Amino acid sequence: MTATDVTGARTPEAADVISGARERIDALDDRIIGLIQERMAVSAVIQEARISSGGRRVNLSREMDVLSHYRDALGKPGTSLAMTLLELCRGRI
Ligand SMILES: O=C(O)C(=O)C[C@]1(C(=O)O)C=C[C@@H](O)C=C1
């Protein structure tokens, strides 16, 4: 397969732009995944402290703040993204 086939571009110049930008996206995705894993670990520390003190795993008022934070920054899809992050961090409820 040629570079143009793989990228969907119709010229070699456009294929070069797309290949370079895809490398940057892959590097960004690796960083995002690392940050999500770091968020999961910090969230686990909070949940363990709360549960071992006799509290509940989930704190809904804090979750509302997290959802608003993402919605304010990213619009409606931000809410879905925050819900997915919360599911990764505290499991399904
Ligand atoms: O901030 C907390 O109290 C947490 O437990 C962290 C966190 C989160 O991952 O953001 C996870 C579970 C809670 O329901 C609320 C928020």
Image: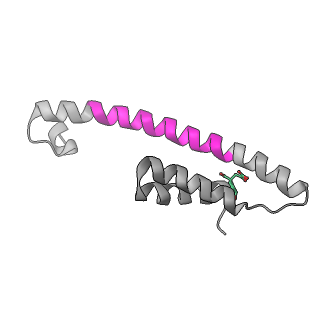
The reply to whether the magenta stretch includes residue 25 is yes
Question: Looking at the image, which residue is at 64% across and 40% down?
Answer: 38
Q: Is residue 71 above or below residue 32?
A: below
Q: Give the magenta range.
A: 20-40
Residue 90 makes an appearance in the image: no
Left or right: residue 66 versus residue 50 is left
Residue 44 makes an appearance in the image: yes
Residue 10 horizontal/vertical position (percent): 9, 41
Residue 46 horizontal/vertical position (percent): 77, 48
In this orientation, which residue lies closer to the viewer: 3 or 10?
10
In this orientation, which residue lies closer to the viewer: 73 or 16?
73
Quadrant housing residue 91:
bottom right
Question: Looking at the image, which residue is at 12% across and 30% down?
Answer: 13
Residue 23 horizontal/vertical position (percent): 34, 32
Residue at the right extreme? 53
Q: Is residue 50 above or below residue 6?
A: below
Left or right: residue 4 versus residue 24 is left
The reply to whether the magenta stretch includes residue 38 is yes
Quadrant housing residue 19:
top left
Residue at the bottom extreme? 93
Residue 55 horizontal/vertical position (percent): 85, 60
Colour approach in the figure: one colour
Query: Dividing the image into 4 quarters, which one contains the C terminus?
Result: bottom right
Left or right: residue 69 versus residue 43 is left
Quadrant housing residue 29:
top left
- Chief secondary structure of the magenta portion: helix
In this orientation, which residue lies closer to the viewer: 30 or 79?
79
Question: Looking at the image, which residue is at 41% across and 54% down?
Answer: 75
Query: Dividing the image into 4 quarters, which one contains the N terminus?
Result: top left
Left or right: residue 92 versus residue 76 is right
